[in-house]
Image (cartoon, rainbow, N blue to C red):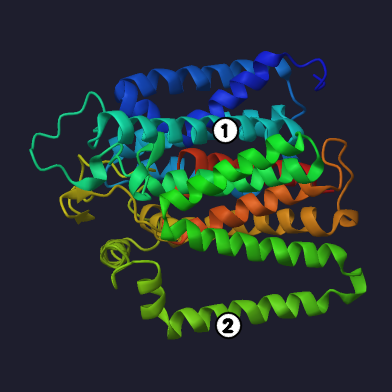
Amino acid sequence: MSTARRPVAVGAFSTLLVFTLFAGDFWRNLLSWWGWGLIAAGLVVGSIVLLVRIRPPLLWRKLPVTLGLFLLLATLSIAWSYYPGASALGVALQWCTTIVALFLALCLEWPELLRALSHAFRWILGLSLLFEFVVAAFIRHPVLPFWTDYGTEKVPQAFYWSRGLLFHGGQIQGIQGNSNLLAMVALLALVVFGVQLADGVVRRGWGIAWLVVAGATFVLTRSATIIIAAVFTAVVLLFALWMRRAHPDRRRPVYLTMLATVVVAVAAVWAFSGQLLKLFGKSEDLTGRLDIWHSVTALASQRPTFGWGWVSYWVPWVEPFTTLAVRKGVTYLQAHNAWLDVWLQLGVLGLVIFILLVATTVKRSWFLAVDRPRISVSDDLPYTSLTLLPLLLIAALVAQSAAESRMLVEAGWMLLVVISVKTKRAAP
């Protein structure tokens, strides 16, 4: 089905799908896990129905082998899982997210995907600022998620939906109830809105206005993790633009400079880690992350080859997750590092496959952005700023993965699958 003939409803459905994947906590906080479950189930069914109706050309050789291997290993891990019931649930959710990601990758062309991301991010940013304004101006006290009883008078700060800090300069949490998640949306929105503005697909004033909204939201979240991700993404953008301008025979200096930049950055972090932590307002244990990483590493070492079994989000009602990462009364449900999380759940074998999945996706995204003549021409992806979109999105995901495991679940996994599949299909 061509873009011109595709019904408007597909675009609206895609926007709702992206919104829900990035703002799942909004539905969970507003309607409970049961309400979110009904919405999620409806979106999965809708994705399957649209896949059947649109019938996009499915060339199996154009699907990433590493993606299939990772999903296969995660599914098989139920057989040796320490918690088979939780693994079955986690694998089911992983497949559901993959299905909706395949709908977005196979049924939407690049401009349509850009538009769906743009509309969803505008809704998230707009509603987040409105929500924080209402809490700060009218409610004037922190707000907890609906339908939740924490059974204690002293509720940990991490449990609040909003702490009403808008008029105090942040740290705002938005409709997602998490400053890091809102900051990541703001960063990705800066990428998406910037691409739209550069390619002239939105009115200049409108595009600049939304860039300001995304930038203001990013600043108000005060997320150190995503600030670092933003710097990394900006550096990737600069090198990509430099590479696009360089003659094919004169690109070695660019790669050498990239390598030197990585070496200098690693050395600087190693030498000035204390000062950098103070600059970002972080404690020496990286807000408890070092303790979590130590616990996860110790546990992963007990089953190093195949792991404890895939579970996606950690489930707090089964061992060993009940006490694996507890800090200030909060039980965290991730390793705060995607690579450690994969090693814990699928062992060294799963980690190798995951590294290959991400590395090949980054490689294809890089050449799609900087070396257009080396890949086949795609009618829906002209050589404009739009070709930078996959690279910048995956760069932000990779940077975030060092301190968060979000690449493995919901919106993070969706973006990884979409970029992996679409760049593979664009390759010769």
Instruction: Characterize the local packing of mark 2: few (<14), some (14-19) or many (20 or more) Cα atoms within 10 angstroms.
Output: few
Disc number lying in front (2 or 1): 1
N-term mark: 2 or 1: 1
- Residue 71 shown left or right of residue 258 in the figure: left
Instruction: Characterize the local packing of mark 1: few (<14), some (14-19) or many (20 or more) Cα atoms within 10 angstroms.
Output: many
Query: The N terminus is located in which quarter?
Result: top right
- Residue, disc 1: 122
For this rendering, which residue is in front, 185 or 47?
Answer: 185
For this rendering, which residue is in front, 218 or 90?
Answer: 218
Q: Position of residue 107 (x, y in %)?
A: 71, 27
Q: Residue at x 82, y 21 (%)?
A: 2
Question: For numbered disc 1, what is the local secondary structure?
Answer: helix
Q: Residue at x 39, y 43 (%)?
A: 312
For this rendering, which residue is in front, 203 or 338?
Answer: 203
Question: For numbered disc 2, what is the local secondary structure?
Answer: helix
Q: Position of residue 86 (x, y in %)?
A: 30, 37
- The answer, for residue 324, to whether it is visible in the render is no
Check disc 1 and give the amino acid type. Arg
**Mark pair 2, 1: CA separation:** 37 Å
Q: Looking at the image, do the residues carrying marks 2 and 1 touch, with CB atoms under 8 Å apart?
A: no
Q: Residue at x 73, y 45 (%)?
A: 195
- The answer, for residue 236, to whether it is visible in the render is yes
Query: What label sits on residue 264 in the rendered view?
Result: 2
- Residue 293 shown left or right of residue 317 in the figure: right
Check disc 2 and give the amino acid type. Val
Q: Position of residue 20 (x, y in %)?
A: 48, 29
- Residue 42 shown left or right of residue 378 in the figure: left
Quadrant for residue 316, please give it: top left
Q: Is residue 349 above or below residue 267?
A: above
Q: Is residue 318 above or below residue 112?
A: below
Q: Position of residue 186 (x, y in %)?
A: 53, 45
